[in-house]
Image: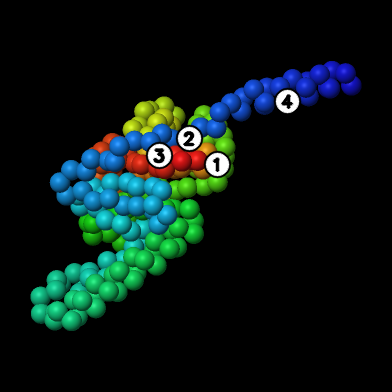
Amino acid sequence: MKKVFALSIISLVVVACSKGPVPTVKSAAPAQLGQGWDLAESSDKTVSLGIAPGWKRGGANSMNMMEFATSGMGTEGMTQEALAQLEQEQQKNDAEVAAELEKKGIVISCIDSSKPIPGEERTRYTVKREKKGPMTLEAAAEAAKEDLIDEKGPTMVDLPIGKAARFDSKSTLRDGGVVTKVVYILCNGDDVYTVSFITENDANSILQVVDPVIQTLRIKPAGA
């Protein structure tokens, strides 16, 4: 009984000592965006991320209303009124997609603007925010492994807003397709952020934007 009691005391001391300061991101100057870049912001304006040239806001299954309406035959012959109506429908669809994603904690989602391959999710990068903390970056990275397959990492990297844990992952689907993922984990007070870059197409279609995009990530520090 004394031995069990002693072990319990030791465990409490270890937990208390391991808590330490609550990890947060740090303030950084606004991201410098190159020509052709745009900026995506969360609805509460606490998170921002660069939109690379050739990319736009949207979700994994976002629909291109223009392509759907014209069946890929182009807009030649369409009236200005019809084009304006399609644009309104696109904006409505994009807003609905963003609202559904936010319910899942995804505060920013960007897709490449190439024509999607039937049956495949769009090549994309997303920022997801979850109330999991406060916890250390190491603990958050360990927890993230549960959602990855054949991951390499984590590798601790320095970003303009502080340290992040990076994972690289490739997994094979039942149909033989390969999913390439690059995932960054960051802690900010009670929030754990997961920034994911995902493609079912050629890996280079996502890998070429990973570094320039992640460098533009800005998050309002907890308590600021």
Q: Residue at x 29, y 41 (%)?
A: 30
As drawn, the residue found furthest toward the front would be 224
Query: With respect to residue 157, does 130 lie above or below?
Result: below
Q: CA distance from mark 3 to mark 1?
A: 19 Å
Q: Amino acid at mark 3?
A: Val
The residue at which mark 2 appears reads as 24
Residue 82, x across and y down, in percent: 19, 80
Is residue 52 shown left or right of residue 128?
left
Is residue 171 among the parts visible in the rendering? no
Residue 155, x across and y down, in percent: 41, 27
Q: CA distance from mark 3 to mark 2?
A: 18 Å
Please tell me whether mark 4 sits on a helix, a strand or a loop.
helix
Sequence-wise first label, 3 or 2 = 2
Single out the mark in the foreground, 3 or 1. Answer: 1
As drawn, the residue found furthest toward the right would be 1
Q: Amino acid at mark 1?
A: Asp
The residue at which mark 1 appears reads as 190
Single out the mark in the foreground, 4 or 2. Answer: 2
Q: Amino acid at mark 2?
A: Thr
The residue at which mark 3 appears reads as 183
Is residue 82 among the parts visible in the rendering? yes
Q: Are marks 1 and 4 in contact (CB under 8 Å)?
A: no
Q: Residues within 10 Å of mark 3 (few under 14, many from 20)?
A: many
Q: Residues within 10 Å of mark 1 (few under 14, many from 20)?
A: some
Please tell me whether mark 1 sits on a helix, a strand or a loop.
loop
Is residue 160 shown left or right of residue 205?
right
Q: Residue at x 36, y 42 (%)?
A: 218
- The dot on residue 68 is none
Please tell me whether mark 2 sits on a helix, a strand or a loop.
loop
